[in-house]
Image (cartoon, rainbow, N blue to C red):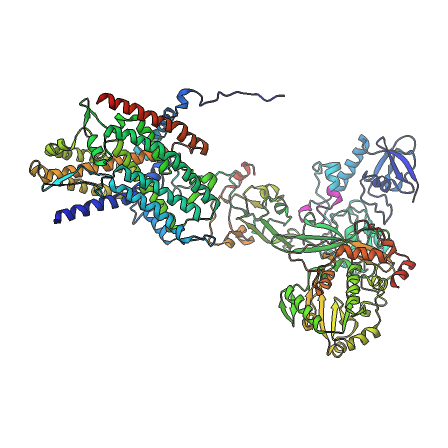
Amino acid sequence: MADKITLFVNGVEVEVESGKNLIDAVAAAGIEIPHLCYHPALGADGNCRMCLVGIEDGRPPLVPACKTPAQAGMKVLLDAAHIKKIQHDVMEFELINHPIDCPICDQAGECKLQDYYMTYHGQPSRMTVPQVQKDKKLDFGCGVVHDQERCVTCGRCVRFCRQITKTGELGIVNRSDQARVTIFPGRPLNNRYALNVVDLCPVGAMTSRDFRFQQRVWFLKKSPGICHGCSKGCNIVIDHHREKYADDRIYRFRPRHNPQVNGYFICDEGRLSYKRENEGRLTAARLGGQPVALADALAACHDELQRTEKVVVLLSPNLSLEQMLAAREWAARHGATLSGYSDGYLKPGDGDGYLIQDDKSANRAGLLLLGIDCRRETFLAALAEAELLINCDNELERSIPAEELQPLLKGTRTILATSHDSPSASTAEIAVPVASFSEYDGAVVNCDGILQYFRKAVGKNEPLPDMADFIAALDGTAADRAGLFTALAALIPALAGQSADTVPAQGLKLNENEAAHVSA
Amino acid sequence: MSALDILMVVVRVAFSAFIPLCFIAVCVWMERRGAGFFQDRSGPNRANIFGFRAAGLVQNLADAAKLIFKEDVTSGHIKHKFYFVLAPLIVFFTAVVSFAVVPFADTLVLGGKSYLMQGIPLDLGILWFLSFVGFSVYGIILAGWSSTNKYGVLGGLRSAAQVISYEIPMGLAIVSLLVVYGTIHLNEIAQFQGQLLFGFIPMWGAVLQPLGMVIFIVAAFAETNRTPFDLAEGESELVAGFHVEYSAMKFAVFFMGEYVALFVSSAMIVTLFFGGYQVPFLSTATLINNAKPVAFLLMIAVPVAMHYFAGWIRRSNVSHYPRENDPRVFEAEIYIKCFWGLVIFLEVVLLLILFADKGGPAAHIFVMLLQMATFLVKITMMIFVYIWVRWTLPRFRYDQLQRLGWQTLLPLALLNIFVTSAVVVALS
Amino acid sequence: MGATVKTLPRKGASLKERLYLIEIVKGMATTFGHFFRNLLDNRRLYVRHYPEVQPEIPVRWRGRHRLTTHEDGSVKCVACFMCQTNCPANCIQITAGERLDGRTEKMPVKFTIDLLECIYCGYCVEACPLDAIRMDTGIFSVTGDKRSSFVLELSDLLASKGAFAEEDYKKGGA
């Protein structure tokens, strides 16, 4: 923890952390200093001049807040007349050549320029000369669309490509009102984090081709979530909206700041993985490939379990800890073999050491934490003997090719509980639709041993049962979520005394000892 | 029983059965157009057959067609379907039957035999009327109860309480009337009113019993469930009250029953207080003796009246917006020609009277027809009063209604009996 | 500042009024006056002989909606969703898409107004930054035989023309 220092903003005493610049320091105290080019992940550039503040006594009278470290006893002026004039004039300057594209601009509603115009300027333009025309709708690659007219040349995107991805595709060319952000001829954006420039851009100059014109941002409900694309468990904002007469639908994922996990960014693959939440879902239960009511399918599961002795339960490494625990308890009660075999989720060499990981499942660490056997041999041995395979959303064909899988499953009936439709959902004797990760609460442990709790974001018109519900329904009961969390807290010392609401937003770091303790 | 006897039975029954039913159409038409005119609008006047609107009467046909062909819904929750269907029939039946004892002309003497001119020649008179009017409310209560609907039940209960409250003043008003007339027989009551008081004022109930008249009319409004006493329907709080579950023809039977009751009630008020079938100042005997001069006067009066009536039709029956070859002008001419045809027919009939024997059967029949016409005109005027009140007065609140019945009308009726009895005893 | 209090005399307390019959007669005289006047001369009824005589629609009347077009017939709307956002009845549904005619980048692919839900408040017209939606068709009566006939599509909205001259509409303070 950094030391606390005291300074004055507009004559009011404020206690802030030392070692930060003025913008970040007073922002923590709830005071906003307007800025366009500064971003905590990219550092101060000082080119927009929007954050100019006055310092009383001594010092230069005007300093850019992004470049000025907070110091004890500093007397910062924010609402003095000359500071207001500066903010007003900077805004006017920024808006000289800014087109009034708001009606067609996807940024409208979350645009800094709009917000600052309303707060600091609010005047009609005084310009009589025509605006400078630049290029619009430029394809920068990686699904980034650039509009040079809207750009305020803050350089955040340029710095992102230089500092974070270290690919340096973008640059600012020309000077003064002809300055524009562009790519080198024939070398478009080519990195796996390129779409972060869309979030970074304070205005609508960078837009995503994927989200382009899909929805106005003020309609979107912004729910926090955890990306299930890989074992990093990046924090995201799930932007979803239920249109009239339609179902709740996710429009985009955006990164959510978590210094312990992903910082400010997410990868493009994870960002676009929202599509999998909307499309290709299994919505109706199937019995022998034919759609039936959910209750009928569950009754069929029940009958099936009455008949069979040897059962194998296969878990997906994407399930939450509660769901895994529910399955573990069920398997223990019924003497079923439990397996977490999912080698197909690993993509060796795909990880880049930054955010993207080799393991494309969200909770493999959770499987290990709960001591669930993930070995191929044990799974195949159990399968060979089993009469019934209860597959909890594990995409087995990723681990074993279909032609090899078929002989293995001969003589074994399959109950598949899955969130997504797949060929195996049609071939399984019983297929039950379950909720996907945006539709339930749960805890996952990422590759670094950080336990994160996420909440249900999307409320479908016809909610599907979550996996814990399905497992409880096999016994004809309802899932006891609070009980599952308590059981989890009993297993994991770090969770002791916590409730679902008190798990820190940044996640809980589990240490080696704890992991070892649980698997026993 | 001679052929004449049978004919007279047919005529009397036909009159007392069909005239109320025919008047349903007239009542509905008067109500709607009257409401329109009271409120400065025109009322229904668009429905037509080949462009003939008959001043809006065709609308009744359209409504009838609609009600007949509408789906007759009986909701599934109604358990007592028999009573549910029975209820409107009770209302309708009692209304029609209660007219049976109302005389529509003086006793007709033909061939030395006298015929009582009323549907059923009973001596029960006013008691018959009271009993059937009291019975009709059972239809309403039954409808409200069998609807299994809280609005319906509330409407039925209100109606029951209202009838109890208003039958008493009505009965007491009639008591004082009977003290004056000395009979319950309606024909004798009507004959009594043919006399003249002090030689120039008709001895009508309205003159002899002004307070009784007010009480009776108020109670009659309440009995017929008309505004300002239509709390059983009470749209503003009970949706439609007792007939909320009724649709199509079942509703139509209620609707018709109400208008028949309106007609009968008017007939009763006219009989008791406005001289019944008596032509003012001209008693039956006078008329029979002076049939020829009266017929002659009518022969002159009818065309003159028709002339002005034709002018009114011509003025009223035009399109009120620029229109080429206005078809309504043509329509008006047709109506006027029809009416003139009717007038000519009347003139011929009157001419026959002029040439008939003095004091013979022709004179008797002429007087009977004249009295029937007088009676119907009086009833129509009374119905107009009903409509007029409906479109003027707002509905009572329920406590106001009960207070009026028990605390005002009842003491007044009792007072009226004492005063009347005292005067009658003093005079005799 | 206290409100100005004006005490009105309570009516209905005097004996004459409590007798009620006199007041009834007075009231009935009033209504009969109207009846008699209208019976004698039905030209004086306060009625419009609709549909033969159509009402005169003022410029500021909020009638059925339409989408305006540029001179070349292309839609002015850029699918900014301002009308949908402002619509208190939530009756406007827009789907935006890429515009390729060079005028701008965005246009509505679908634009539906459910007239059964519309409350004709005119907020969409006020919200529109481009004067692309107007309620100046002068259509005040919309009829249909099924629900879907009240759902106006983009083509329906573009098909109807304004009922007023441009300068009159502007003067009307749209």
> In the rendered image, which quarter is residue A334 located in?
bottom right
Q: Position of residue A94 (x, y in %)?
A: 76, 42
- Vertical position of residue B172 compared to residue A251: above or below: above
Q: Is C115 inside the magenta-drawn segment?
A: no
* Foreground of the two, A15 or A309: A309
Q: Quadrant of residue B12?
A: top left
Which residue corresponds to the image point at 39% horizontal and 44% vertical from the top-left? B140
- Position of the C terminus of chain B, as image quadrant, is top left
At which x and y percent is residue B145? 44, 46
Spot occupied by residue A212 in the image (x, y as percentages of width and height): 70, 54
Res. B326 visible in picture? no
Please give left or right for residue B234 compared with residue A128 in the image: left
Please tell me in which quadrant of the rendered image residue A356 appears.
Answer: bottom right
Camera-nearest residue between B223 and A45: B223
Percent x, y of residue B97: 28, 44
- Judge by depth and name the residue closer to the eye, B240 or B337: B240
Indicate left or right for A483 with B145 as reference: right
Q: What residue range appears in magenta?
A: A102-114
